[in-house]
Image: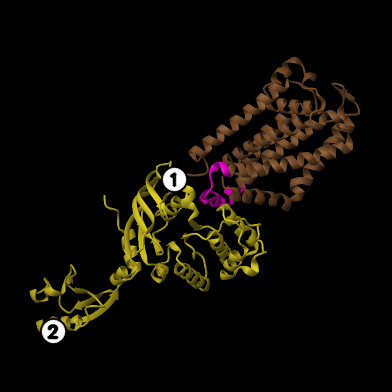
Chain colours: A yellow, B brown
Amino acid sequence: MTHNIISISGLSKTYPKGFEALRNIHLDIRQGELFALLGPNGAGKTTLINLICGIVRPTVGSVSVGGFDIITRYKQARAMIGLVPQELTTDAFETVWATVCYTRGLFGKRPDPAYLEKLLRDLSLWEKKDSQIVTLSGGMKRRVLIAKALSHQPHVLFLDEPTAGVDVALRRDMWQLVRDLRNAGVTIILTTHYIEEAEEMADRIGVIRKGELILVEDKVELMRKLGMKRLSLQLAEPMTAIPPSLAGYGLELSPDGNVLTYTYDSQSERGMIAALLDTLNRLGIAFHDLNTSQRSLEDIFVSLVHEDAAP
Amino acid sequence: MNPIAFLTIYRYQMARTWRTLFQSVFSPVISTSLYFVVFGSAIGSRITEVDGIHYGAFIVPGLVMMSLLTQSVSNASFAIYFPRFTGTIYELLSAPLSYMEIVLSYTAAAVSKSILLATIILLTASIFVPLHIAHPVWMVLFMLLTATTFSLLGFIIGIWADNFEKLQLVPLLIVTPLTFLGGTFYSVQMLPPFWQTVSLFNPVVYLISGFRWSFYDIADVPLSISLLVTGAFLAICLAILAWIFKTGYRLKQ
């Protein structure tokens, strides 16, 4: 049975100038899962991560990592965490090897050259181990940050937009790396702008908007919603009301009476379209055009984050 | 205490010294040698003795102390400001380290660097003038106390500064003038009475006086007062740091 490795309860953060970055967040992250946190710029994703990692102080609420409170038992909590920040912040004049050893040491771990060599090889950084970070490409620097975050063998890894500004090939490599880490038992919390990234990898998805966590759901469940399709029929003659014999289909009529829309689950409602069209034909309802559309996760995300917050 | 993390930060900071050897070690040695040439030889040829000490030898404790102060402040302030400037401070803040461990490791590195430099300057001075150290244990104690206090001050400046200009502001506008006016090149007793009184408000006077006493057994102010003022300054720095860490000032929001 999986248990929660991170528990967040009633967490809020208001910055000194009054900006409320997080509002009453409740969230449990299960051990070993890959949780994707989606949200537009300024939604509070990075604040949430920084708060769990000890970089920002909470205003209200509590967070525990591996059962350790991040305030009262911060050393034990932080020892479990690896953080890959959004910005490419590195000691430019250090070598890759020195910076990775440094991070491992900061976490109180004894040197382990064999582990670090394997880590750098896995990240295709071994050949660059003696290079100054300033000489590396952006993608390589991103890998260095990942190597640093993994240098002390954390149980939880935070990836704050790891593929921002990364080319497609490298992004695919990163995804594979993240999958491997997850398979190795590391719990991963990923923030991203790329819906595709969440679709590709996440076990669960959370959506944050204006500091509020407005949705947390299994990806499979979201994919089921993704499977909802819409069939729109352009009627030959405007309709004033939906006939009672069509009530079972849950149809929607546009205000002008010209478009009839049927929303259905493409996975489980096969054959219903034929039945609907047959019924329309029997009722003598003609249409001159039809089209189908699928609601993507992106549509769901966009509708969620752009919806005005409830008063 | 996390000894591995402490040593990691300490070694990392010391490695920067070796990497920037010219800037860290050679340039202060060159500038101090120039002081000896200008004050020791050129001006010193007209001032033969101060309090019975050859002028060239008289200024040695002041010059060593001046380097110790400025280097302690600049080493510590830069060491903590740079990760704030580059953003790598996130590593320190998210590591399982207490603030005390962070301050201790950074201060230990800054103290080591400045004492190393002071020792080199002392050795350089011995080439120019005959040196006599009357109380070597006190000399080491004063060096340690001063380097620690001013490294803590540097650490505070490095946290307070939010740009490179501010980082230089306190060392240039406060520390250096106080050092020059603190009796580096003269005895406070040589000043008119009014300026002697003004000098007593300069904490550097007490540092240099105590340090010079450890060399030549002569002092502008009693040793106990020197120690008391240095100790008080250390306590003030520690209190400010405690406040910084309690509030997260410029470190954590």
User: Which residue of the protein is positioned furthest toward the top in this rendering?
Assistant: B193
Q: Which mark is residue A71?
A: 1
What is the distance, in whole Å, between disc 1 and disc 2 at their CAs? 68 Å
Query: Percent x, y for residue B56?
Result: 86, 30
User: Which stretch appears magenta?
Assistant: B82-101
Residue annotated with mark 2:
A281
Please state if A280 lies on the left or on the right of A87 as rendered.
left
Residue at image position (66%, 36%) is B148
**Tag 2 secondary structure:** helix
**Tag 1 secondary structure:** loop
Few, some or many residues within 10 Å of mark 1 (<14, 14–19, 20+): some
Residue type pointed to by label 2: Asn
Majority secondary structure in the magenta region: helix
Given the image, what chain letter belongs to the residue carrying mark 2?
A
* Residues behind callouts 1 and 2 on a single chain: yes
Q: Residue A287 versus residue A88: which sits nearer the camera?
A: A88
Q: Is residue A55 visible?
A: no
Rendered position, A250 above or below B137: below
Label whose residue precedes the other's in the sequence (1 or 2): 1
Indicate the quadrant containing the N terminus of chain B: top left, top right, bottom left or bottom right: top right
Quadrant of the image occupied by residue B177: top right
Query: Percent x, y for residue A207?
Result: 35, 60
